[in-house]
Image (tube, rainbow, N blue to C red):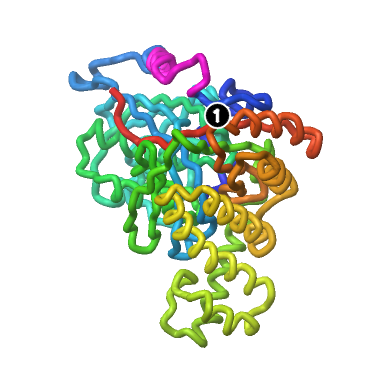
Amino acid sequence: MSTPMENGPGVSASGTAGPQAAGALNAAQSAETLADRVRTLQDEFRRRFPYDARVHGTDAAPVVVRSPGRVNLIGEHTDYNDGFVLPLAIDREILLTGRRRTDGRVRVYSLNFGQEASFHLNDLRGLRPGGDAAPAGRDAPWSDYVRGVVWALLDAGFEPGGFDMALAGNIPVGAGLSSSAALEVGTAVLLRELYRLELDSVQMAKLCQRAENDFVGVQCGIMDQFTVALGRQGHGLLLDTRTLEYRYVPIPTQNVRLVVADTGVGRQLASSAYNQRRAECETAVELLRRRLPDIRALRDVPPHRFEQHRHELADVIARRAAHVIYENARVQATADALANDNFTACGRLMHASHVSLRDNFEVSSPELDEMVAIAEGVPGVYGARMTGAGFGGCTVSLVRADAVPDLVKAIADQYPRRTGKTPAVYVVTPSDGAARLI
């Protein structure tokens, strides 16, 4: 699930890539191409961090990395319960460019926020997770994700050096599309390329998760970082978050589209509620273990055994557990349905997921519910659900390709009238994971 990030690195609240008027579509329909945005980033990088042989050395050619956001098709709040998820990387991204420094200093500039942050590698060496390793970027909170990745690499025995870096993104902040994971993994890829680190994509995802858990202090699961690191164009990623076994699931974009609708409501409550829900799931495991001693997490509880003992749990704890247990089954059923192009079945499973998130896990919101209702009232929409941590952010809809304009129009016409808020709509395409461009 997406982690709460109110001051994320994707776009600023006032930035040109922020939530647009209803009906605005994604970068694929924008006049500004990826190549245009790379050039803008490179120009600003050269202006802000001019080459100096005394600091940068002779082997200091800038590297450019693309790191995507992600949307979760189904499988919400299952990752930290050792469960199954079905996310995909998307064609919205953070772009990063940087070059080595020889003095151990790190300077980072965000075009979206117009802010620069700096620190030294020695500031991070030897810090204890959960203790000394506290965020330091008070004036630029987004930079804590960069610090966290550098700290995690150093703590794991890697030896990146200093660097200058600039970044810019078009991932909406607070929408549940993983701008934090995109920045973390993008930073790791940049450092891997600059310093030729022996770091594979799975290792990278684990280290970036650790940066967020132990440095930033958000106890997220690994889904976001894993998807950003290992996404594949045209595919979703069915991931077992316990074993990290995964397989790619084709999403035939010639037949269906994925439409992400931003409610315009930030997830201000998500951080505290996230930790509360996590604690409630842990309580459910402790209580169920009295009857099912072999379980380690809710993913180990078969639905029929849960129903046998459900009455022994307090109502709230039982509903939290029910969501996770049945959501795991829905994830695997959705992957099977996609593999057979059974989009009707996918839609039913997405609808059931949203109902469970609303009623059992209680992380939806009136705006999310209205957005789902609007989408499901449009012919050609197979199913819709909230995606991300909840209490705001986005919905995702599986839509017949020729029905996309009707869905966009319905949201533009109905959502402001029902909620008084202005939505943004993005048609997203399954994308490759983070990688070097230049």
User: How many numbered markers are drawn?
Assistant: 1
Q: Position of residue 12 (x, y in %)?
A: 58, 28
**Circle 1: is it few (<14), some (14-19), or many (20+) Cα within 10 Å?**
many
Secondary structure character of the magenta stretch overall: helix
| Up/down of 95 relative to 250, above or below | above
Which quarter of the figure is the C terminus placed in? top left
Relative to 326, 203 lies left or right = left
Residue 11: quadrant of the picture: top right
Q: What residue lies at 42% left-to-right and 31% top-to-bottom? A: 118
Q: Residue furthest bottom?
A: 291
Q: What residue lies at 44% left-to-right and 43% top-to-bottom? A: 88
Q: Position of residue 399 (x, y in %)?
A: 56, 39
Residue 146 among those drawn in magenta? no
Q: What residue lies at 70% left-to-right and 43% top-to-bottom? A: 377
SS for callout 1: loop
Residue 34 among those drawn in magenta? yes
State the residue position of label 1. Answer: 11
| In the foreground, 167 or 364 | 364
Residue 141 in sight here: no
Magenta region: 28-44
- Could you tell me the amino acid type at mark 1? Val
| In the foreground, 132 or 113 | 113
Relative to 84, 25 lies left or right = right
Residue 50 in sight here: yes
| Up/down of 414 relative to 242, above or below | above
Residue 250: quadrant of the picture: top left
| Up/down of 425 relative to 360, above or below | above
Q: Position of residue 341 (x, y in %)?
A: 44, 47
Q: Position of residue 334 (x, y in %)?
A: 48, 55
Q: What residue lies at 63% left-to-right and 84% top-to-bottom? A: 312
